């Protein structure tokens, strides 16, 4: 817990402006739950409570398709030890290839734009007090033509399991950034309070998450995981971003805006997932997750 307090102090000192790419989603389950479910396991997600990890050896990969041919790919390996769990992952998002122009609007060579994160995570297994914590470090590289930017990001969190009530409560401090370059872009550090409750009389695991984005904005996420059988889970989610995305162009867009839907199918050897997220302005994001246990 002492290390979490240190991260909190650093985060207060370092939140100023926005790097939008840090808010991209990299896993299908994030789409399905509309950005919520901070206590739901998703190894390829760039941002989740670092204390939340798979207790089995696994290899995971994801592919997310954004509008305008933007693609996000991820790889992650989870390796449990006796009392700890190590996670190594890579997240990459490509914005495409563009035609370059000089100051006279004369075409020049093509250029690319992309962002990459290399992640190392550490989490403890739940102890006697049913509390486990975790930390992650990410090295961030951003490229736009000949312009490059890099930084390092730290996150920390804990999860308290109250087994008597089938309840998990988690708190995470995410994206505390330190620069390698002299650029003045600093991502707002985010704080996420997550609650996950398994209902007694329904095959439903309800998640409620509150996101506080460093005095810039707050969002509330409500999502759920429905267990159809031992192999199939069905996901739904929405958030208060529905209000800011509501353009009132159509009733359908207003209803579906900032909402997600998806499913997972798997056993003790392999898991496949598909997720779909709808923008209130129209358009959608979709993607797949694939995980192998070994």
Image (cartoon, helix red, strand yellow):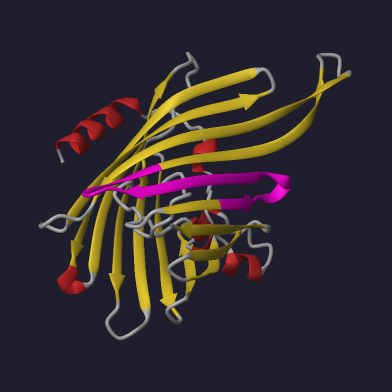
Location of residue 150 in the rendering, given as x and y in whole percent from the top left corner: 50, 22
Location of residue 63 in the rendering, given as x and y in whole percent from the top left corner: 61, 51
Q: Main secondary structure of the magenta part?
A: strand
As drawn, the residue found furthest toward the right would be: 106
Q: Is residue 75 magenta?
A: yes
As drawn, the residue found furthest toward the bottom would be: 201
Which region of the structure is painted magenta?
62-87
Give the residue displayed 68% in from the left and 67% down from the top.
250
Q: Is residue 21 left or right of residue 179?
A: right
Is residue 14 placed above or below 106 in the rendered structure?
A: below
Residue closest to the eye, 148 or 267: 267
Give the residue displayed 47% in from the left and 55% down from the top.
35
Q: Is residue 284 left or right of residue 123?
A: right
As drawn, the residue found furthest toward the front would be: 294
Is residue 173 placed above or below 177 in the rendered structure?
A: below
Residue closest to the eye, 182 or 164: 164
Q: Quadrant of residue 216?
A: top left
Q: Is residue 157 visible?
A: no
Q: Is residue 179 magenta?
A: no
Give the residue displayed 78% in from the left and 31% down from the top.
98
Q: Is residue 193 left or right of residue 31?
A: left
Q: Is residue 144 visible?
A: yes
Is residue 120 placed above or below 58 in the rendered structure?
A: above
Give the residue displayed 18% in from the left and 69% down from the top.
163
Residue closest to the eye, 44 or 3: 44
Location of residue 116 in the rendering, given as x and y in whole percent from the top left corner: 55, 33
Is residue 133 placed above or below 96 in the rendered structure?
A: below
Q: Quadrant of residue 179?
A: top left
Location of residue 255 in the rendering, given as x and y in whole percent from the top left corner: 58, 69
């Amino acid at each position: 817990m002492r290390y979490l307090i240190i991260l909190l102090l650093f985060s207060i000192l370092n939140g100023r402006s926005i790097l939008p790419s840090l808010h991209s989603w990299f896993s299908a389950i994030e789409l399905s739950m509309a950005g919520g479910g901070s206590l739901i396991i998703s190894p390829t997600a760039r941002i989740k409570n670092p204390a939340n990890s798979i207790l089995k050896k696994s290899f995971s990969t994801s592919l997310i398709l954004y509008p305008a041919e933007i693609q996000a790919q991820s790889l992650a390996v989870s390796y449990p030890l006796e009392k700890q769990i190590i996670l190594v992952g890579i997240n990459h998002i490509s914005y495409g290839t563009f035609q370059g122009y000089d100051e006279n609007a004369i075409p020049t060579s093509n250029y690319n734009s992309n962002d990459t994160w290399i992640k190392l995570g550490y989490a403890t297994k739940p102890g006697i007090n049913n509390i486990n914590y975790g930390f992650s470090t990410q090295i961030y590289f951003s490229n736009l033509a000949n312009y490059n930017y890099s930084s390092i990001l730290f996150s920390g969190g804990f999860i308290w399991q109250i087994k008597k009530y089938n309840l998990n409560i988690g708190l995470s401090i995410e994206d505390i950034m330190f620069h390698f370059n002299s650029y003045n872009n600093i991502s707002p550090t985010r704080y996420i309070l997550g609650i996950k409750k398994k209902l007694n009389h329904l095959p439903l695991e309800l998640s409620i998450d509150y996101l506080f984005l460093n005095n810039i904005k707050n969002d509330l996420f409500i999502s759920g995981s429905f267990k159809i059988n031992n192999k199939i889970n069905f996901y739904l989610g929405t958030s208060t971003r529905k209000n800011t995305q509501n353009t009132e162009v159509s009733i359908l867009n207003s209803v579906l805006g900032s909402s997600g839907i998806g499913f997972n199918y798997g056993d003790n050897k392999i898991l496949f997932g598909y997720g779909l997220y709808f923008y209130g302005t129209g358009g959608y994001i979709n993607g797949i997750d694939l995980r192998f246990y070994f």
